[in-house]
Image (tube, rainbow, N blue to C red):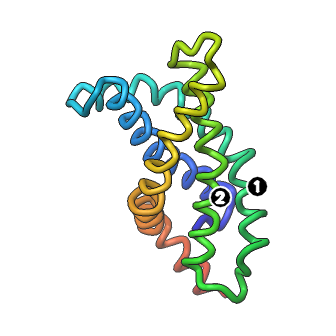
Amino acid sequence: MPKNKFQEVIFTIMMVFVMVYAMICYNISLNMGGMSNEVFLAAFHELIIMGPIAFILDFFLVGPIAKKKAFMIVNPQKDNPFMIVLAISVLSIIGMCPLMSLAATLLFKDAGNQIIAVWFQTTVFNFPMAFFWQLCFAGPIVRKVFGVIFREEQKEEVAFD
């Protein structure tokens, strides 16, 4: 887990890329009626727009709120680290999914006067995918890669404690 602001920024960028790219692929494939190779390329075009939106929302709004609420549920001094990660992840999904679905609805869906209905439908379709992708794939992969990247710094910190 990140130990300072620089690491938080890097971790958030990594998580945003993995989550947002996968969710864009998912939504494009839903719109096209199935998955195809062109989905992967098309997703990069939306990633340029949705990535910064997700970073700003996660880093400045949802992330801090999710951590604050998570620490009301779990105790970092007593609880298993897995439970802490799980609490923060679930609360992040609960906050990010509706907000990112709203952004996608406004930017990429021709909702017209049905904006609330389209947003709700988009959120309902996205939530299960976001939930399982985050908990089963994105979260573990990003934490593993992040741990490898910052392993030396963390070992040095332990040596000086």
User: Residue tagged by mark 1?
Assistant: 65
**Mark 1, mark 2: which one is toward the viewer?**
2
Question: With 2 as the anchor, is 43 left or right in this view?
Answer: left
At 37% across and 37% down in the image, what residue appears? Answer: 26
- x and y percent of residue 126 in the render? 49, 41
C-beta proximity under 8 Å, tags 1 and 2: yes
Q: Quadrant of the N terminus?
A: bottom right
> What mark, if any, has residue 91 been given in the picture?
2
Secondary structure of the residue carrying tag 1 is: helix
Gap between marks 1 and 2 measured at Cα: 8 Å
The answer to whether residue 149 is visible is no
Furthest residue toward left: 37
**Above or below, comparing residue 97 to residue 156 in the picture:** above
- x and y percent of residue 13 in the render? 54, 46
The answer to whether residue 90 is visible is yes
Secondary structure of the residue carrying tag 2 is: helix
> What mark, if any, has residue 31 been given in the picture?
none
At 68% across and 47% down in the image, what residue appears? Answer: 59
What's the residue type where badge 2 is placed?
Leu
Question: With 61 as the anchor, is 138 left or right in this view?
Answer: left
Q: Choose between 118 and 138: the one closer to the eye.
A: 118
- x and y percent of residue 49 in the render? 53, 25
